[in-house]
Image (cartoon, grey):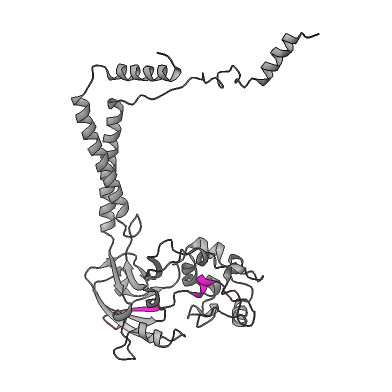
Amino acid sequence: MSTPAENEADNEHQKSKKPADTAFKQQRLPAWQPIITANTALPVFLAIGLIFIPIGIVLVVTSERVLEFDLDYTDTNCMSLNVSNTTCADVLAQANYTGASCTCQKSFTLDKDFEGDVYFYYGLVNYYQNHRRYVRSRDDNQLLGKKDAVSSDCQPFQKSVNGTDITPCGAIANSKFNDSLVLSMNGNISVPLLRTGIAWSTDKAVKFKNPDNPQNWFATNPRPPNWQQDAWHLDTNLTDDNNGYQNEDFIVWMRTAAMPTFRKLYRKLSLTESTTFQNGLPKGTYVLTITYNYPVTSFSGRKQFIISTTSWMGGKNPFLGWAYITVGIICMITFVVFLVLHKTWKTDDPLAYQMRSMQMNQRTAAGYN
């Protein structure tokens, strides 16, 4: 039979919150703590500087070799050919944005040959495609060709006035960019442009599919309010693989931009249709004929037409190169400063000095004098 003293000892043992006497719980596991000295830190700064600066220079030079030309064709930069002394933006505003169209022309000169693959973009400024409700305003199941009832996320472009589902639904689809841009050289040589191969292949193969009997489906279902034609007639060449939800202009637009100033791929130069353009876009005078359908002045937006070549690192983007150069220069400056300090205030045995400091800190933390 247990004595009262034994019972009291057992109760104290049960109430104790002392961790078990193990190496893990008592923090006696072997550990390694790096001791950073000038002899170990300075070579790291030097190596980073010597590596990053040349990489940055290569990236900047590569970016500078990418040729780019941009042309703003908003408000006064696009005067109507049909209404004298009136901008196309004003023509659309006077029609109260009810589907009116306007045509203008802009001439420009390329001073250099744009050799190799040439890409044409449209750019928008002050256009917030990244707004939360705007980004959600779509139905991915509908874009996969499913004929189920569309998602309520498409509001207020979910259903037409008669209650039928809009195809395609949502604010993104309803606001699709619909300017037409035609380029000619010297005003009489048409520049051959490819309207396919501009969207991500994964998007077209996985995310966008047409329903069964698409021509009849799109003809019998209401289109978005701002569209002038149904989805099956987005490509005027009426090619089945580039119409409906699989139209590449539509797919490119549906991939929303993260920033309010962005560009989207519009066309690619065809290198096989004409001997004039088999090596790229030659220097000379060009005329851009614009069918101005897309209003932007009501929200202080801007529209641009952009021509660009590419390199192994993509389009023109000097930021990455200058970032590498900046980091490299900072590391080199840090190396020089610390090297001078190290040579000026060098102790007889820096490792022993640092070990003594660590031991003193440990004793202080343990409560020893």
Location of residue 272 (image quadrant): bottom left
Q: Say which of 28 and 48 sits in front.
A: 28
> Can you name the residue that lies furthest to the front here?
4
In which quadrant will I find the C terminus? top left
**Residue placed at 39% from the left, 74% from the top?**
299
Q: Is residue 22 visible?
A: yes
Specify whether residue 79 is painted magenta: no
Q: Say which of 101 and 351 sits in front.
A: 351
Q: Looking at the picture, how far across and down is residue 22, in whole percent? A: 58, 18
- Label the magenta part by its dominant secondary structure: loop
In the picture shown, does residue 178 fall above or below 261? below
Location of residue 361 (image quadrant): top left
Q: Looking at the picture, how far across and down is residue 29, in whole percent? A: 51, 20
**Residue placed at 59% from the left, 71% from the top?**
210
Q: Is residue 285 visible?
A: no
Q: Looking at the picture, how far across and down is residue 2, in whole percent? A: 78, 9
Left or right relative to 229: residue 38: left
